[in-house]
Image (cartoon, grey):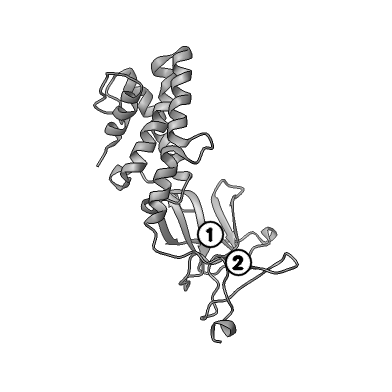
């Protein structure tokens, strides 16, 4: 599997740079390694945040904190330190991660139930407490969070994720490596290759699509109450 150095060298090669960095953390002393050390984490974390990657998705029981009564929520939890993008707050007994509320004719949303009487994804909000602590408010007791983590282990990355990350990194490095108009043109070109004109296609679209195809759950946009399921 590709390492941080491999991904950095691929990005440099995209820009026609003949240098081969030996280390970016710490940098090996070359200007290229210094640039890669600066931009690689930004490119990686931004790409991780853009999609619910299977290799970066975690499920953890949240640590409960004292709730601020003025918040209007019943429970307060600490955010995981490696949280990049939250997906869902769940009941600890949940068996379904994907169902959503039923939208009634008048526009309000009912709280649907499974056969066991447990609706899974719960309302929540991410905030920062007065002391700077990153917190999650919800009405769910014993809440479990599914989220995308800030994965740094490159052996977890899929090949298409690696290709997208290298292209994105190349777009960030271009201005420093090539300078001037050539750098600006290369930055735009590799941004387009990485994400397409709409920001969601290009290599990213292929990587995200392949990742989504690995998921075995079925999203259900409507969730029936128990007495209907029993009919």
Q: Quadrant of the C terminus?
A: bottom right
Q: Secondary structure at mark 1?
A: strand
**Rendered image: mark on residue 90:** none
Rendered image quadrant of residue 121: bottom right
Does 142 appear above or below 158?
below
Question: Which residue shows up at 52% across the image and 81% down it?
Answer: 115
Q: Nearer the viewer, residue 1 or 65?
A: 1
Q: Is residue 112 above or below residue 24?
A: below
Mark 2 or mark 1: whose residue is earlier in sequence: 1
Left or right: 68 in relation to 52: right
Can you see residue 127? yes
Residue 83: x and y, percent?
A: 46, 50
| Residue plotted at (42% across, 47% down) | 208
Residue 24 in sight from this viewpoint: no
Are the residues at dot 2 and dot 1 in contact (C-beta closer than 8 Å)? Answer: no
How packed is label 1: few (under 14 Cα within 10 Å), some, or many (20 or more)? many
Q: Quadrant of the N terminus?
A: top left
Q: Residue at x 58, y 82 (%)?
A: 228
Mark 2 → mark 1, Cα distance in angstroms: 11 Å
Disc 1: which residue: 77
Crowding around mark 2 (Cα neighbors within 10 Å: few <14, some 14 to 19, many 20+) is: some
Q: Given the current orientation, which residue lies at the most extreme bottom position?
A: 231
Can you give x and y, in whole percent of width and height, for residue 227 in the image?
Answer: 59, 85
Residue 210 appears at what percent x and percent y? 38, 50
Judged from the image, the secondary structure of the residue bearing numbered disc 2 is: loop
| Residue located at (43% from left, 61% from top) | 60
Disc ID at residue 139:
2
- Name the side, left or right, on which 7 lies relative to 102: left
Q: Nearer the viewer, mark 2 or mark 1?
A: 2
Quarter residue 34 falls in? top left
Quarter of the image where one finds residue 155 = top left
The outermost residue toward the right is 106
């Amino acid at each position: 599997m590709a390492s941080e150095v491999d991904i950095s060298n691929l990005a440099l090669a995209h820009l026609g740079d003949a240098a081969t960095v030996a280390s970016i953390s710490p940098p090996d002393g070359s200007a290229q390694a210094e640039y890669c050390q600066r931009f690689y984490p930004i490119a990686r974390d931004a790409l991780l945040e853009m999609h619910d990657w299977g290799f970066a998705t975690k499920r953890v029981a949240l640590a409960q904190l004292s709730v601020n009564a003025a918040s209007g929520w019943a429970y307060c939890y600490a955010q995981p330190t490696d949280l990049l993008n939250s997906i869902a707050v769940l009941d600890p007994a949940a068996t379904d991660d994907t169902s959503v509320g039923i939208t009634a004719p008048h526009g309000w949303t009912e709280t649907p139930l499974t056969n066991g009487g447990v609706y899974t994804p719960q309302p929540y909000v991410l905030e920062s407490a007065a002391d700077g602590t990153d917190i999650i408010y919800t009405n769910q007791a014993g809440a479990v969070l599914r989220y995308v983590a800030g994965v740094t282990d490159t052996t977890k990355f899929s090949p298409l994720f690696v290709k997208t990350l290298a292209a994105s990194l190349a777009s960030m490095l271009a201005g420093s490596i090539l300078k001037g108009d050539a750098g600006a043109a290369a930055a735009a070109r590799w941004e387009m290759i990485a994400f397409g004109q709409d920001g969601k296609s290009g290599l990213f679209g292929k990587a995200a699509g392949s990742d989504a195809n690995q998921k075995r759950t079925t999203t259900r946009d409507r969730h029936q109450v128990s007495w209907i399921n029993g009919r």
